[in-house]
Image: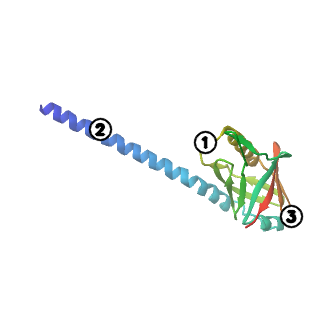
Amino acid sequence: KNYKNIKNIFERNDFIMKSKTVLVLMSIFLVLTFTSGFAAKSKVSKGTSVNNSMNTNKLLHTSWKLKSVSGKALKKVVIEGREENVMITLNFSSDVINGSGGVNNYTAGYKIKGNNISLTQISSTLRAGFTELMKAEQNYFQILQNVKTFELKGDILTLKSDNGSLVFSKMPN
């Protein structure tokens, strides 16, 4: 009987240790996940700061809505028999962009020099969505990650990469 009691104690202790290990690993994962956006932000701010050129100042604290991808107007998608707008947005702060990719929220650091723009690795949430929206978001992220230049004409912002372009219209503040 004593043997069974001792065995039960060890089994409970083993379970408690495994539970604590899982909790510690989950905590580390969450901390790393939530700080990745801050790391991208600090990486940019420690490097070359954003220029104070005329174009840069016009992008600061602005919000944009995607209108076309590589010359093709953003269309409504049919989801479960009804048409839905694809809402993809881009917001600029002093050293970070963020927005909605249509399904997931995203963030990245950025640098501007003249009309050149570069981004740090895009971080996004990991929600799942309808196939049509996920395809549009994936295409957007692929082009956005590789942007090299931008052009600002009034309320129209164009971001260009080797694999496509993104045209946005300015959203009211």
Instruction: State the image quarter where residue 131 is shown.
Output: top right
If you read the primary sequence from the N terminus, does the residue marked by circle 3 or circle 1 appear first? 1
Q: Position of residue 52 (x, y in %)?
A: 78, 68
- Would residue 12 appear left or right of 144 to someone viewing this image? left
Residue positioned most to the left: 1
Instruction: Say which residue label 2 marks.
Output: 14
Q: Position of residue 93 (x, y in %)?
A: 69, 64
Query: Element under label 3?
Result: loop
Disc 3 versus disc 2: distance between alpha carbons?
65 Å
Q: Residues within 10 Å of mark 3 (few under 14, many from 20)?
A: few
The image shows residue 105, relative to residue 49, as above or below, that is above
Q: Amino acid at mark 1?
A: Ala
How many residues crowd around disc 2 within 10 Å: few (fewer than 14), some, or many (20 or more)? few
Residue 73 located left or right of residue 88: right
> Can you tell which of label 3 and label 2 is closer to the viewer?
3
Residue at position x 65%, y 40% in the image: 130
Residue beneath disc 1: 128
Q: Quadrant of the N terminus?
A: top left
Find residue 154 and name its label.
3
